[in-house]
């Protein structure tokens, strides 16, 4: 069954556009506000108004979005595979 002929075609097209839009937004805006400190990067103590840096984001107030984290992991894996292939090719010439 061809999915483009069925009544689910608009659903697939919308999902493709949503996925492309999410990928684009993760490329342009890779960070989101830290969930723990809500983007402040620190916590104020109720006593003496002392400051403690957020441990989750190391005081930056931002964390990578899920899509960007997945892209970075894929890029790391791709680089590791390419490096291993180059190493194998170089060692095979000897
Ligand atoms: Zn934080």
Image (cartoon, rainbow, N blue to C red):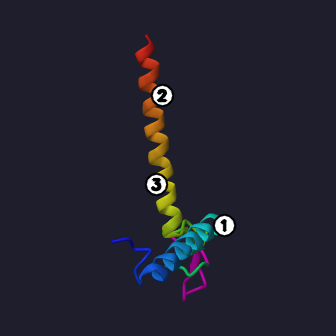
SS majority, magenta: loop
Local crowd at mark 1 within 10 Å, few (<14), some, or many (≥20)?
few
- Contact flag, marks 2 and 3 (Cβ < 8 Å): no
The residue to which callout 1 is attached is 28
Name the element at disc 3: helix
The residue to which callout 2 is attached is 86
Q: Which residues are magenta?
A: 40-54
Considering every residue shown, the one lying at the far bottom of the view is: 46
Considering every residue shown, the one lying at the far left of the view is: 1
* Residue 52 pos. (x, y %): 55, 74
Q: Residue at x 45, y 13 (%)?
A: 93
Q: Is residue 55 visible?
A: no
Above or below 73: residue 22: below
The residue to which callout 3 is attached is 73
Q: Which mark is residue 5?
A: none
- Contact flag, marks 2 and 1 (Cβ < 8 Å): no
* Residue 30 pos. (x, y %): 60, 66
Q: Is residue 29 left or right of residue 90?
A: right
Q: Residue at x 50, y 67 (%)?
A: 67
């Amino acid at each position: 069954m061809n999915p483009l002929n069925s009544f689910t075609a608009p659903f697939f097209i919308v999902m493709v556009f949503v996925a492309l839009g999410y990928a684009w937004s993760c490329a342009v805006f890779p960070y989101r506000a830290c969930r723990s400190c809500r983007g402040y990067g620190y916590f104020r103590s109720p006593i003496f108004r002392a400051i403690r840096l957020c441990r989750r984001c190391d005081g930056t107030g931002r964390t990578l979005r899920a899509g960007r984290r997945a892209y970075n992991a894929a890029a790391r894996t791709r680089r590791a595979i390419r490096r291993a292939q180059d190493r194998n090719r170089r060692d095979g010439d000897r």
